[in-house]
Amino acid sequence: MAALYYMIPVAVIVVGLAIWLFFWAVNSGQYDDLDSPAHSILFDDDDPNHKAGVEKADREAGKDQDRPGD
């Protein structure tokens, strides 16, 4: 029975910390864009039409300027 006197306040503190972390994540924008990361894995890195593929190709080639037509 004496353990309950310690465990209940600890549980309340843990729940309060979890709620605070959730609201911090929401306010800092952690959940703003949920679709882009899921769709980005569908594109091939070597696809020149995909912006991530173009940036990676530029970095590998050592180019710092923009591509013509961008």
Image: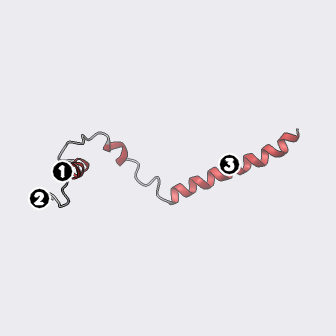
What is the count of numbered marks? 3
Q: Going by the image, does 36 lie left or right of 23?
A: left
Helix, strand or loop at mark 3: helix
Residue annotated with mark 2: 68
Residue annotated with mark 3: 15
Scheme of colours in the image = secondary structure
Q: Earlier in the sequence, mark 1 or mark 2?
A: 1
Between the C-alphas of marks 3 and 2, the distance is 54 Å
Between the C-alphas of marks 3 and 1, the distance is 51 Å
Residue annotated with mark 1: 61
Q: Amino acid at mark 1?
A: Ala
Residue 16, numbered circle: none
Between the C-alphas of marks 1 and 2, the distance is 15 Å
Mark 2 and mark 1 in contact (Cβ < 8 Å)? Answer: no
Mark 1 and mark 3 in contact (Cβ < 8 Å)? Answer: no
Residue at image coords 14%, 57%:
67
Residue at image coords 62%, 52%:
19
Q: Earlier in the sequence, mark 3 or mark 2?
A: 3
Q: Going by the image, does 25 lie left or right of 4?
A: left
Q: Position of residue 8 (x, y in %)?
A: 78, 45
Q: Amino acid at mark 3?
A: Val
Residue at image coords 20%, 50%:
54
Q: Position of residue 53 (x, y in %)?
A: 23, 47
Q: Is residue 59 above or below residue 4?
A: below
Q: Nearer the viewer, residue 64 or 36?
A: 64
Q: Amino acid at mark 2?
A: Pro
Numbered disc in front, either 3 or 2? 2
Within-10-Å neighbours for mark 3: few <14, some 14–19, many 20+: few
Q: Position of residue 34 (x, y in %)?
A: 41, 48
